[in-house]
Image (cartoon, rainbow, N blue to C red):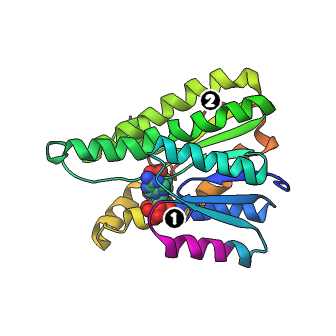
Amino acid sequence: MNFNGKVILITGGSRGIGNSIAKEFVKLGGTVIINYRHNDAAAKQTLKDIEDLGGYAVSIKGDVSSYSFTKSMINDILNKFGKIDVLINNAGISKIGLFIDMHEGDFDSIIGTNLKGVFNTCHSVAKHMIDRRQGSIINISSIWGEVGASCEVLYSASKGGINSFTKALGKELAPSGIRVNAVQPGIINTEMNKWLTKEEKEELEGEIPMMRFGEGEDIAKLTTFLASEDSKYITSQIITVDGGYIKDKN
Ligand code: NDP
């Protein structure tokens, strides 16, 4: 796989899984743009990680749940780099809690970031990709989008929406030479899971056939494959990376 000369936009690229995906593309020669929302220090660190790998990246701060921000970010990238070859929709938030304790604002922020964010970027980039008759879009979903998680109803709904969105958009854009796929991770070692106690973490690990949480790199390796020519006949797919966790949970 080789991404020399390719321009890759990664939303939520400043931390966790996004950081791993950014580094993997850079190792393969890609030019990476990382988007993030709040944490300047994390974005700076990711840019440094990329520089240390001998790569080139820029960061763009802003909220993917805003259509106008997303549109202007994509226009700015097209003006500066001339193209976007790969779009990775990775930005995401979660909130754990009973459904009856959720508020309308939780619905708006979780669906707004996780699902509307994917609509926003895809809507702004699709025409450009159609004009070039090439491009690859990869959405980072979750196993909970497939099987649903207790105490993560809104998060599960947002990821289930991403899965259907991916399958449908992949079909619609395939004749234009664009592929759309999703990766649905199981439980990955990032700050999103920092709230787990040691005991809760051990209990969860015990339920995973591979007996460990995944690492960002496990997601990044599949993501780069799905973005590459090596997967040129794969589209509209939701691919699970979870150490065997949800096999019997449907
Ligand atoms: P992290 O919390 O570690 O990182 C989230 C990233 O998304 C940060 O870069 C954050 O930026 C960015 N972000 C959040 N909201 C927005 C927004 N509105 N606009 C732009 N950027 C935003 O998450 P993970 O790395 O764990 O998760 C990455 C993706 O993988 C998410 O979509 C998540 O749902 C999914 N996933 C994660 C799993 C896990 O176990 N960790 C399992 C399954 C799926 P900032 O820090 O500046 O706010």
Q: Is mark 1 within 8 Å of ligand 1?
A: yes
Secondary structure found at label 2: loop
What SS does tag 1 mark? helix
The residue that label 1 is drawn on is: 16
Instruction: Identify the residue at horizontal 75%, vertical 67% (top origin).
Output: 56
Is residue 233 highlighted in magenta? Answer: no
Residue 16 rendering spot, x and y as whole percentages: 51, 64
Sooner in the amino-acid sequence: mark 1 or mark 2 = 1
Q: Give the CA separation, mark 1 to mark 2.
A: 25 Å
Q: Image quarter for residue 179?
A: top right
For this view, does 227 lie left or right of residue 209?
Answer: right
Residue at 29%, 46% in the rendered image: 152
Q: Is residue 164 placed above or below 55 in the rendered structure?
A: above
Q: Locate the C terminus by quadrant.
A: top left
Residue 83 visible within the image: yes
Q: Which residues are magenta?
A: 37-49
Magenta span dominant secondary structure: helix
Residue 97 placed where, x, y %?
Answer: 21, 52
Report the front residue among 128 and 234: 128
Q: Which residue is mark 2?
A: 236
Above or below, 184 against 197 in this view is: above
